[in-house]
Amino acid sequence: MTIDLSLRWQVIAGDCLEVMRQLPDGCVDAVVTDPPYNAINRETAGLRSLDKGAADSAPIDIPALAAEFWRVGSGSFYVWCSGEQLSAWLLAFRALGATTRHCAWWKTNPSPMNGESLWLSALELCVFARKPLATFNLHCAHPVWREAVAEANGHPTPKPVHLMQRQIRASLPPNGLVLDPFCGSGSTGVAAVGDAHRFIGIENDPQWLPLARRRIADAAAQGNLFQEAP
């Protein structure tokens, strides 16, 4: 497989580890991705539960993924994860020599499911890791981002485009290259091309490829979507 790094955007079908092995060292400026959490599809002591299918429960090898992200990336890494996965991602990146931070999405409109019995599920977690001299375009900014839940687009676990845009704006040089190895419905790609960056997405589930490609193509056709901060 030959991957053209000069293309404005591309979404490649396949296993992300296999595809990433075709990329040269240090070729992407940032990895911004949302792998399966392996946390939602489970028994819940009598409370209502959600089944997100393979989008949530596909197995992932965190140490192997972190190592490959580190090889292909030259700057920063943002990995969304469950609370159960948080320590594993932090340890994997720190073992590679990364500086890390905990980040969080504070949902402004969380689902009311089971709200009569317990606190709403209003936070999602993200691990930030960086290599020395990685681009950082902010100053003294905190990594807690308030954003509304994404509008339904057919995918069971979409991230809001503006949420992914925050990480891209913080950590990309002009005309940077963003990699999302778990592309899903393409929100990271929409955020990247909408801010005049290049994008490579990888998706192992063929049912999401048309959706991701359509959304990113629409964003690319509209030019710079995000001239002002959200």
Image (cartoon, helix red, strand yellow):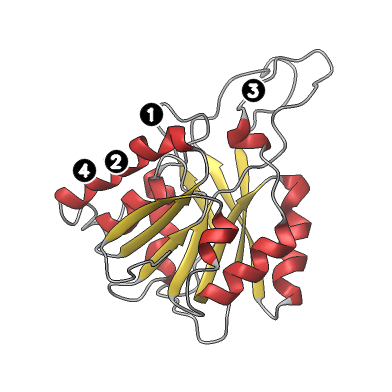
Position of 145 compared to 80: left or right? left
N-terminal label among 2 and 3: 3
Q: What is the number of the mark on residue 51?
A: 3
Q: Amino acid at mark 4?
A: Asp
Pointer 1 and pointer 2: residues touching (CB < 8 Å)?
yes
Pointer 4 and pointer 2: residues touching (CB < 8 Å)?
yes
Residue 170 vs residue 77, the one in the foreground: 77
Q: Which residue is mark 2?
A: 215
Q: Amino acid at mark 3?
A: Asp
Q: What is the number of the mark on residue 59?
A: none
Residue at image position (62%, 27%) is 53
Q: Amino acid at mark 1?
A: Asn
Bin the neighbour count of mark 2 within 10 Å (Cα to Cα): few under 14, some 14-19, many 20 and up: some
Answer above or below: position of 148 versus 219. Answer: above
Q: Which residue is mark 1?
A: 153
Q: CA distance from mark 4 to mark 2?
A: 5 Å
Pointer 3 and pointer 4: residues touching (CB < 8 Å)?
no
Q: Position of residue 41 (x, y in %)?
A: 71, 27
Mark 3 residue element: loop
Q: Which residue is mark 4?
A: 218
Q: Position of residue 157 (x, y in %)?
A: 52, 34
Answer above or below: position of 155 versus 142. Answer: above
N-terminal label among 1 and 3: 3
Mark 2 residue element: helix
